[in-house]
Amino acid sequence: MSDLTKLDWNHIRAFLKTAETGSLSAAARRLDLTQPTLSRQVAALEQDLGVMLFERIGRTLVLTDAGADLLEHTRAMGAAADRVALAASGQAQSIEGRVRITASDVMSAYVLPEALRRIRAQAPRLEIEVIAANDIRDLMRREADIAIRHVRPEQPDLIARLVREATAHFYAASGYLDRRGRPVTKDDLATHDFIAFGDVTEMLGHLTPLGLPLTRANFRLGSQSGVVAWDYVRQGFGIAPMDDGVAAATPGVERVLPQMEPLLFPVWLTAHRELHTSRRIRLVFDILAEYLTG
């Protein structure tokens, strides 16, 4: 990828808006440009980079592999530029209205607070409602404006961005491990108590393929609430997998089988296409994306 700092920002902005809308005419309207002007800017960027960024399928423009790669590099630039423009004009401080964010209860309680501080600092007049739910809320029915989930949505009218590949390990309270012993191998886990996050059968479906010798008998305590289940771990009732960042911020717990490969799970940030026309949703989406990516 060429050094993006040496490219014309107008050309990059034209590419970003075209990628977001999938249409030269729609992108031109968003940027208040004529379609030929926008088309020339995208073509100039392709010439500067020496690659084709779009291919036309019917009436729709589709990103090439090179275009998709460039999009990942330039999204952060676009978000930063939007926030600079809002800050310079004082508009961020004046943005009002409600934005509803849905995320798991664990993420809502342990991960989002710092992002919410950033949102309040930049847009203090916004009203933020956090819907802490472990089920997948339907953005199409406007149950939320922005969703943070570990699965990519399938609806074509939603905009989804993979913001990170998070890692997790198994954790337990030091007091529990002092009493029951510290497992050295996966086989040692067979004699330990585990805390269930939601449905035990579903949890075993994720853990058994990892070569863990666990059965329902290992899960004598659990909760549909991830926050409650994690607190049971903290209080010494047993072992459970947890996001490494959340565990690191929890006093009194330690990693079990530290040599074990981490569990990987994606974090998707999703919004309806209203993202393109709502300043308040776009601002919150961009701040969340920057925070979660970091």
Image (cartoon, rainbow, N blue to C red):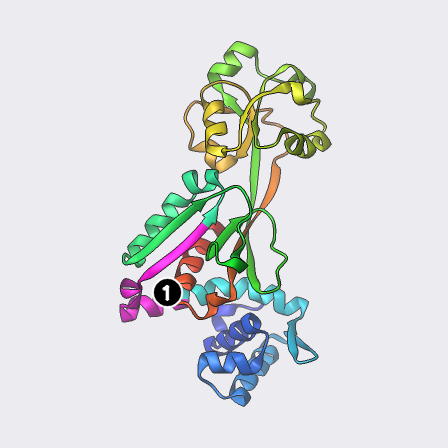
55 in the magenta segment: no
The overriding secondary structure of the stretch rendered in magenta is helix
Q: How far across and down, in percent of the image, does residue 108 sit?
A: 43, 42
Q: Position of residue 200 (x, y in %)?
A: 63, 29
Residue span colored magenta: 81-101
Residue 153 falls in image quadrant: bottom right
The residue drawn where x is 51% and y is 66% is 273
Between 91 and 88, the one nearer to me in the picture = 91
Residue at 62% across / 64% down in the picture?
156
Q: Position of residue 287 (x, y in %)?
A: 41, 56
Q: Which residue is mark 1?
A: 83
The image shows residue 69, relative to residue 128, as above or below, that is below
Tell me which amino acid carries mark 1: Arg
Residue 91 part of the magenta segment: yes
Q: Determine whether, in the image, residue 160 is placed left or right of residue 175.
A: right
Residue 99 visible from this viewpoint: yes
**What is the x, y in percent for residue 126?**
31, 58
| Residue located at (61% from left, 41% from top) | 264
